Image (spheres, rainbow, N blue to C red):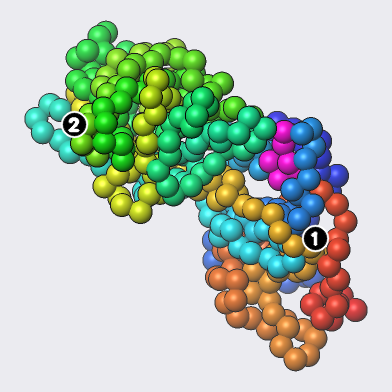
Amino acid sequence: MKKHSIKLFAAYFLITISNSCFSDDSEIFFSKDTSQTKPNIVFLLDISGSMLSELDGKKTRLDVLVESFEEIISDPSVANLRVGVMSFDSYTEKVQEVIDIDLIDSSKDIVKTTSGEETTLQQRIIISRDDAREPTAENYEKLEFKDTSVALKTGNVIRTLGFRFDNILLKKPQTVGMTSTDRGIKQATLTLSTSTNDERDIYVFTDSGDDVPYFKNHFKYLSSRAIGNSIICKSPSNQKTFNCDVTEIIRNKINQPNWRDGNAIAFYVKAVSDSATIYLRDYSDGNYHPKLTIKANNLMVAENRMTYREDIITKSANLITAGNTSIVQGMYDVARYITNMQKSGSAGPSHDNQWGKSPLLEGCQLTHMVIMTDGEATGGYSGTVGPYIG
């Protein structure tokens, strides 16, 4: 695994907390070869109030933490591991139970309908951070992820919306012997919804890359990416839902040199002149959620290979800051999760399921804790860790 440089976090510890195994002259027998058991790593992330401090006027400490964590987990060389995430401020929370990050996540599969030689793929926005809006105020830099309808234009300020569709299960045409994407992709439609009664024109852009990372909380992030191919799409009058023909956009995307099935494609929406109001994914009425529908030759359709890496990154990206920096309490709670340890009246461990089932698969399974934080502990350990360490 390549070395990752994390400038902010002076306290970036790797602590082994698995049960120790001892032997004298006796033989120790295991039910299976423990060398084949993947190690556990629990990341303990600091979300205390100080993580809201800005570093350069554009990013907070939490932004840097999340980006650093994403860089680590998304690295393909980080493999053959079981990873979990816990966060701490004044209290500790289990964000993601320990799970094999290379395990296929069946919940991320796409709805497929096959008829003859043609398959229809229907994709909705999978996660909450895959649709976003830029604020209208010039001095407000953060993206907004909200369950609402959004006006594309307020006064003279044009707002950009972003819709990221993850896990596009289309193969590169050349890999299945197709020299023309016209044969491979029959039709592709982006479905949006509006509350505007009048007919409106909107721009639909893509970016120039062959894969789209998670949307970042950076200044004018969506606007800066809306530099690729674009089309003009009409939102008809007195019609809530409308379709934009993005067939050529999809064909161009999957023809890019580094395209691979499972990549993401994003669309960026702007007003042409007059404003239109577009619904985001989390709007209460599910009928208005953005949707991408692709009709393709059966040979072009790939199988789902999405792993739990995506879930782990997404859940960490949704963390918000609050409270004190109770590092010691957080470390103690990780240990309780790993061993199901809890104080019960007198010193010494007892076992329960307060933190869920222990991730240990074998008594001597290697288990690490990685702490990502910006400073010293502000919470004491009286009544929690103290009784166990004297």
Which span of residues is magenta-colored?
58-63
Q: Measure the alpha-carbon separation of dots 1 and 2.
A: 52 Å
**Residue appearing at x 43%, y 39% in the figure:** 150
Tell me the residue at 51%/25% (across/down): 156
Is there any visible trace of residue 267 in the rendered image? no
Q: Position of residue 178 (x, y in %)?
A: 25, 12
Of the 4 image quadrants, the one containing the C terminus is bottom right
Closest to the observer, 81 or 148: 148
**Label 1, on which residue?**
325
Depicted 378 relative to depicted 99: above or below: below
Inspect the image, locate mark 2, and give the three-letter code of the amino acid beneath it.
Answer: Thr
Asked which secondary structure carries label 2, the reply is strand
**Splitting the image into 4 quarters, where does residue 15 fall?**
bottom right
- Residue 146 in percent (x, y) is at 48, 47
Residue 53 appears in the rendering:
yes
Is 60 colored magenta in this rendering?
Answer: yes
The foreground one among 241 and 16 is 241
